[in-house]
Each structure stands twice: as structure tokens, then as C-alpha cells.
Amino acid sequence: MVDPAAPARRGRPGHDQQAVLREAVALFIRQGYDATSMGDLARALGLSKSAIYHHVASKEQLLGLALDAALAELTEAVEAATAPAYDAGSGGSGPSAYERLRVLVARSVEVLVAHQPEVTLLLRVRGNSPVELAALERRRWIDARLADLVRAAVEEGALRDDVDPQLVSRLLFGMVNSLVEWHRPGGEVDAAVLAHAVTTLAFEGLRAPTPG
Amino acid sequence: MVDPAAPARRGRPGHDQQAVLREAVALFIRQGYDATSMGDLARALGLSKSAIYHHVASKEQLLGLALDAALAELTEAVEAATAPAYDAGSGGSGPSAYERLRVLVARSVEVLVAHQPEVTLLLRVRGNSPVELAALERRRWIDARLADLVRAAVEEGALRDDVDPQLVSRLLFGMVNSLVEWHRPGGEVDAAVLAHAVTTLAFEGLRAPTPG
């Protein structure tokens, strides 16, 4: 995104767009997107405002890049789990809807841990701008695919049918998303342990397995 | 809280402290606590600012009242589930830790649904003022009691012991708290249905019971 023809006055060397984005996301989380100015960002990076504009066009572009980073990987995981090849009647013998749902839940935890700041922003989006509205639209698409997959797993007979699939989908991914509230990036619990805990709780439940 | 000696110039009749508080909570949720002024609140209520001050001393008092409403019921539910009489060795024959945990999870869902706006605020508190710090302190007390109760249920042999109790406690109440993100007060899903769905998912898990 940096115009190679732009004058090379970058204030301090070594700041590329990724570094600017990282700091912007941290500020947006700490003090809120609306309350953060490009001036705040420049100060946090020790750069001039014009140096920031060598890397990004606007605050909204920074938000868009952050939300895209979270959404791209989530979308990819959902697409992998719900490819048309898996549809009933396609004659395939791939993994069941239940198996794909279980993998998707685990994968969601991993994406969240790998992109925790960006996912935190995504979960706070309320639709106050075109960038936010586009992100909400993509979240709704993901939510609808998740609910379909839960429904398919119920229809297969693999999941209990006494709880509404839409409600199950919300609770399941509500639990996944709640990780952003307490998990510390690089903290004591790693992604694989978390993914195992979430899938075990969700699918097997907390009750001790009855012996035998 | 209304001083009976205060002059009776209330702008519009019928506004008591509860009505002011309700509107304040709605504004705090919609536009953020920091970004909301007493002037905004007066405008939303169609009252003068001085009329508002007949009902409450400050914006911070309104936040404190809202957080207290959420915390009082949650604290009561936690105290009921973790009374010292239940401690091992007290010789009682009351409900097991597992039974008390299960009731507490269901009760937490009901409290959240009954006080959804106040719980939403509580979950957003970041500790920017003495009122917020006091609320965080009370949340930490609740979280510690919950983790203790999960641990007691594991020790009883009622809950699986292959997932860390602290992690279980966070995931369990992360799922409960995530309700504020999508549940609409007075919406299509009632508290009893939600409480049943949450406890079933958490304790029995989503996998269909094996027949027989």
C-alpha cells in the first residue's frame, strides 16, 4: 500500500504497515476505535502523522485490514467445513457433519488465539461505518453456515435433538468467543489445550464419563 | 434518594430514580459510559439537567447502582451455592457440589436474562474509576467461588478430571455471559429454555445420548 513514489520521510526507519496496524489495533482495543485519532497512533509509534499516512490511507483502512485478518481465516475454516462436496446426495464419503463441526470448533479456537487482537475488534463491531457493516455482513454469513452445520449434525443423529440448533450454534461459538475476555496472548494456556477443552466441554459435556 | 425538601420542579412528572437509571443504562450501553454526559441523559429523558440531579448525585452513582443491581443477585446465587454448611466435613447431607453447580449455572442464566442491561455493563467494566474497580473486585470474588465449586465437583468424581477446573469455570461462565451478545430482552427464547440449553450443553454435551 506504500506508494513507491512517495518521499522517503518515514520519521523512524523499520515501521512498515504491519507494525502500524499492530499498534492501531492495540489502541482501538484499549481506548475504543471512535476515541482513537491518527494523532494518538502517531504519538504511540513515535512517528509524525504524515509518516503514518505513508503506510495507510485512513483510520478506517486500518480497521478494515484488522477485521479482514480475522475474517479471512474464520471464513476459510468455515468454507473448509461446509464445502458443497459434503452436501447430502453428493455421493461423497467424506467426514460426517459432526466430525467437520468438531474440527471447525477446534479451528475457531486456534484462529482466535492466533489473531486475538483482531478477533477482539471484530466482536466489538457495531456497524457504525461501511467497513463495520461489511464485517457484520461477513459475520452473519459465518453464523448462518455454522447453524446449518449444527443442523446437519443433528439430522445425522450425531447431536442431541432436544436443543434448538440455532441456540446450540450461538452457545457454542459464544463460548469460543468468550476466550477473548480472559485469554492472554502468549499466556499460560496454549491453543491446542484450549481447543481440546472447548470441544470436550461442548461435545462430551462436563459430567464424568460413567465407568464401563 | 430524592430529597423531599427539594423544590418540586421535575420538568416532567413520573420520572423516578428507576426510570432515570433505566435510561442511563441504555445510553451507557449504546454510546459507552465515558462518552455519555448527564446532558445526554437529560435530553434522552426530556428533562432539564437540574431535574436529573433531583434523582441522582452523579453519572458515577448511576453506574454504581446499575452494577450493584447485577452483582447483588449474582452474589446471592453464588452464596446460596457455596454456603459454608456445604463444606466437606461439616457433616451435612445437602446437595452435592455438582448439583449446586448445575443450579448455579441455571440461576446465572436467569439473572442475566432478568438484568441483561446491567449485566452487559458489568461485563464491559474495565476499572477506570473507583466504582468500576469495586465492581471488578466483586466479579473476581464471584469467579474464585465458581472455580472452587467446579473443583469440588471434580473432587467428588461428578465432573471429568481431564480439563483444568479453572479453565472449565471460565468456559462455562464465558458461555453464560455470551448470551448478552445476542439475546434480546423480552425476545423469542425465554429464560427457562435458555437455562436448560446451557446446562444440557455444559454437563451432558452435544453428542446424542447413546441408546440403551
Image (spheres, coloured by chain):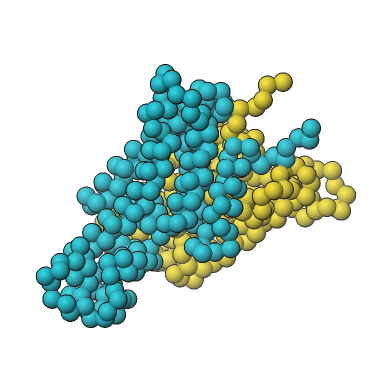
Chain colours: A cyan, B yellow
Q: Nearer the viewer, residue B49 or B2?
A: B49
Q: Position of residue A82 (x, y in %)?
A: 41, 33
Q: Nearer the viewer, residue B49 or A183?
A: A183
* B112 over B71 or under it: above or below: above
Q: Position of residue A98 (x, y in %)?
A: 53, 31
Q: Nearer the viewer, residue A204 or A54?
A: A54
Instruction: Decide if residue B26 is on the left or right side of residue B173.
Output: left
* A118 over A145 or under it: above or below: below
Residue A199 occupies quadrant: top right
Residue B141 occupies quadrant: bottom right
Instruction: Decide if residue B114 is on the left or right side of residue B153.
Output: left
Q: Is residue B20 visible?
A: no
Residue at 56% of width from left, 23% of height from top? A157
Residue at 72% of width from left, 44% of height from top? B159
What is the tally of numbered marks visible in this picture?
0
Q: Nearer the viewer, residue B111 or A20?
A: A20
Residue at 49% of width from left, 49% of height from top? A109
Quarter in which the C terminus of chain B is drawn: top right
Q: Position of residue B166 (x, y in %)?
A: 64, 56
Residue at 85% of width from left, 47% of height from top? B92
* B43 over A84 or under it: above or below: below
Q: Is residue B60 visible?
A: yes
Instruction: Decide if residue B22 is on the left or right side of residue A100.
Output: left
Q: Position of residue A118 (x, y in %)?
A: 38, 57
Instruction: Decide if residue A128 is on the left or right side of residue A98.
Output: left
